[in-house]
Image (cartoon, grey):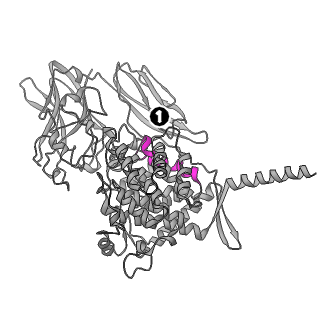
């Protein structure tokens, strides 16, 4: 009997432990305080860090100047009599409204809709590139793909996605997966990993107050061999080796992940670098918000984003009540954090808000999500508690994610996937229509060799086992690309003025830029040396640029494809564009019946233009020895002094010319 009693006791303990592992509970009062900490902590970190953004690169800031305080932003806080929006909090504010509109798991298509309507300026790098691709017609995750978003490796997703985790308290696996899903709106590869790691920490921080444990626990949600996971482990090792000198650790991280970073991804906004600096500040800050903020700023690079993210994380760990008044109520007369005012100065048609109201709305979303994933509200003698199911998992909504259309040339093998990371394992079928002769469709992949040019409407279907959806596509089979056979390249600018370019405000790794116009018919559409800028002398004036080809004998041409390169903040686009051919007397004429697919944007603002996309010009076939595109280049005003004297230019990676039958 005694032995049986021990066995039963052991089984009961095992079952109790299993139940505890499956669920966690938190009082509604504490839940609200921690979600308040997430919002207010992010506002503190963002506004605290802004004056130091990109300031400390070569060397860190001086600890002798701690505490930094709000610096010049104290006046801005007074101007708005509250907190003001910035990209560290305003897109999360947008995401809150999208959750309220569509539910806790909006689709990528719904996210695109929200971005395009509310975001019209004041985003940069990967966020801005994603927005341009949305205007082109892409949906995520193609908007974050490394193949189309040349800023895929930048910091952007770390600073806009924390809300997916603090609406999933204690549901750490769910928060990690949903954070990755959201990160892919703007980013790819290892650049999504810091978002996953911080997302896991945010969800776990509702039940953990040990910074070191939090960092290590969240690493479990990153894949084996992940670059960022290895970097975080290096930060932990540096902290153990130099526990009293964050400067020593910072120097080693800056050397390895900035100064010695591979040239194509070497920027001060690199996701791996900046994610590591946030972990450094967390460890050396020791849980003290003020010191963590100061180290976060002094560590440098894109520091306002780190301080916002880690400020919100500490806010979740300790609650809003633990945030010092000097940081949350820095102005005389304020009785609530930031005077309970969040003033929107950055997002179109987003109202100012009461911070208390933002917190309550977020709590409502967290409760709704938890209850939809197996959690529940439990009434106790001490009040209500939210019980969450830690086994909850995020499954991306079923949808056709829209990316590039297949580039199909008659007589040339094609291998194109319509699938992406979120629907690759679904059941793909050809529901309607006939494929071009020579092509086959299987598991979302189109492959084979098309026999002849033409247009083929088809309907594809997609199923996850419980739901099936359909979408129409038109497959365009082109003739032969004869650009590589041209006898000469026609261009008004044949060599980019690189000296001037490198003095401007450029955001890409230097290997991206080609020296000579010859790259526009080499078949390489992305990567090192693929992009040609028609950038000439220092003269900020509109100019006409042209690019084309000359052939020794007449060719019958009916289609031209223009692959745009990467856009800078100050240019790369055009105000108008046309296709021209040369007649027998040497005169240039515009082609007749020209249509463009997809349609050209209604606005010529460089801000919303996409990187690395194709525009297909179809027209009545002409027989000619020369064809070109000609454009009025767009002059885009810019704040940088050197850039103000830059000539307008086109950014092109490939120009293809197709024979007509």
- Look at the numbered disc 1 and give the secondary structure of its residue: strand
- Few, some or many C-alpha atoms within 10 Å of disc 1 (few <14, some 14-19, many ≥20)? some
Name above or below for residue 99 compared with residue 222: below
| Residue 269 place in picture, x, y as percent | 34, 49
Q: Which residue occupies the foreground of this view, 281 or 30?
A: 281
Kindly tell me whether residue 612 is visible in this rendering: no
| Residue 58 place in picture, x, y as percent | 28, 51
Q: Quadrant of residue 653?
A: top left
Q: Quadrant of residue 451?
A: top left
The residue range painted magenta reads: 171-192
Q: Is residue 583 magenta?
A: no
Name the residue at 61% across, 39% down: 465
Give left or right: position of 328 versus 469.
Answer: left
Name above or below for residue 16 compared with residue 660: below
| Residue 328 place in picture, x, y as percent | 42, 72
Q: Label 1 belongs to which residue?
A: 459
Name the residue at 39% across, 44% down: 143
């Amino acid at each position: 009997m005694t032995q049986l009693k021990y066995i039963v006791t052991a089984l009961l303990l095992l079952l109790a432990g299993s139940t505890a592992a499956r669920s966690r509970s938190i009082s509604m009062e504490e839940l609200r305080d921690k979600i308040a900490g997430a919002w207010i902590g992010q506002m503190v970190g963002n506004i605290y860090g802004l004056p130091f953004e990109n300031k400390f690169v070569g060397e860190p800031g001086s600890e002798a100047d701690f505490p930094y305080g709000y610096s010049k932003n104290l006046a801005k806080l007074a101007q708005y009599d509250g907190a003001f929006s910035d990209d560290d909090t305003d897109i999360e504010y947008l995401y809150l409204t999208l959750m309220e509109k569509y539910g806790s798991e909006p689709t990528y298509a719904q996210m695109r809709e929200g971005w395009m309507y509310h975001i019209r300026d004041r985003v940069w790098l990967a966020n801005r590139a994603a927005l341009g691709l949305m205007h082109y017609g892409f949906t995520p995750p193609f908007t974050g793909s490394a193949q189309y978003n040349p800023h895929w490796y930048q910091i952007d997703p770390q600073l806009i996605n924390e809300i997916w985790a603090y609406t999933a308290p204690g549901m750490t696996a769910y928060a990690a997966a949903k954070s990755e899903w959201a990160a892919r709106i703007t980013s790819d590869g290892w650049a999504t990993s810091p978002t996953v790691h911080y997302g896991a920490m945010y969800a776990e921080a509702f039940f953990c107050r040990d910074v070191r444990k939090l960092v290590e626990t969240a690493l479990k949600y990153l894949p084996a061999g992940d670059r960022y996971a290895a970097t975080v482990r290096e930060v932990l090792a540096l902290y153990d080796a130099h526990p009293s000198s964050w400067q020593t650790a910072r120097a080693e991280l800056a050397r390895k992940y900035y100064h010695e970073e591979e040239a194509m991804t070497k920027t001060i906004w690199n996701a791996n670098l900046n994610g590591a600096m946030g972990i450094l500040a967390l460890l050396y800050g020791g849980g003290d918000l003020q010191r963590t903020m100061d180290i976060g700023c002094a560590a440098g690079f894109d520091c306002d984003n780190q301080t916002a993210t880690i400020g919100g994380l500490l806010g979740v760990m300790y609650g809003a009540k633990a945030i010092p008044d000097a940081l949350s109520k820095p102005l005389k007369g304020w009785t609530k954090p930031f005077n309970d005012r969040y003033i929107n100065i950055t997002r179109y048609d987003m109202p100012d808000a009461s911070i208390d109201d933002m917190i309550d709305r977020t709590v409502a979303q967290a409760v709704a999500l938890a209850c939809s994933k197996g959690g529940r509200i439990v009434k106790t003698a001490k009040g209500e508690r939210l019980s969450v199911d830690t086994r909850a998992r995020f499954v991306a909504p079923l949808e056709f994610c829209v990316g590039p259309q297949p580039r199909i040339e008659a007589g040339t093998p094609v291998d194109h996937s319509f699938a992406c990371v979120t629907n690759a394992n679904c059941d793909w079928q050809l529901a309607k229509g006939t494929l071009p002769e020579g092509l086959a469709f299987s598991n979302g992949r189109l492959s084979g060799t098309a026999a002849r040019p033409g247009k083929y409407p088809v309907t594809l279907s997609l199923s996850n086992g419980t739901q099936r959806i359909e979408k129409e596509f038109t497959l365009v089979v082109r003739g032969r690309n004869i650009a590589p056979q041209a006898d000469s390249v026609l261009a008004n600018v044949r060599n980019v003025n690189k000296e001037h370019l490198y003095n401007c405000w450029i955001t890409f790794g230097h290997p991206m830029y080609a020296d000579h116009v010859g790259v526009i018919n080499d078949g390489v559409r992305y990567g090192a040396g693929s992009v040609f800028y028609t950038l000439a002398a220092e003269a900020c004036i509109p100019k006409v640029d042209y690019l084309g080809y000359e052939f020794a004998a007449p060719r019958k041409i009916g289609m031209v494809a223009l692959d745009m390169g990467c856009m800078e903040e100050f240019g790369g686009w055009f105000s108008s564009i046309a296709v021209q051919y040369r007649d027998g007397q040497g005169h240039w004429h515009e082609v007749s019946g020209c249509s463009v697919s997809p349609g050209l944007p209604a606005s010529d603002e460089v801000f919303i233009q996409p990187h690395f996309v194709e525009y297909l010009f179809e027209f009545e076939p002409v027989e000619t020895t020369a064809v070109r595109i000609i454009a009025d280049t767009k002059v885009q005003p810019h704040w940088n002094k050197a850039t103000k004297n830059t000539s307008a230019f086109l950014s092109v990676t490939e120009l293809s010319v197709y024979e007509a039958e």
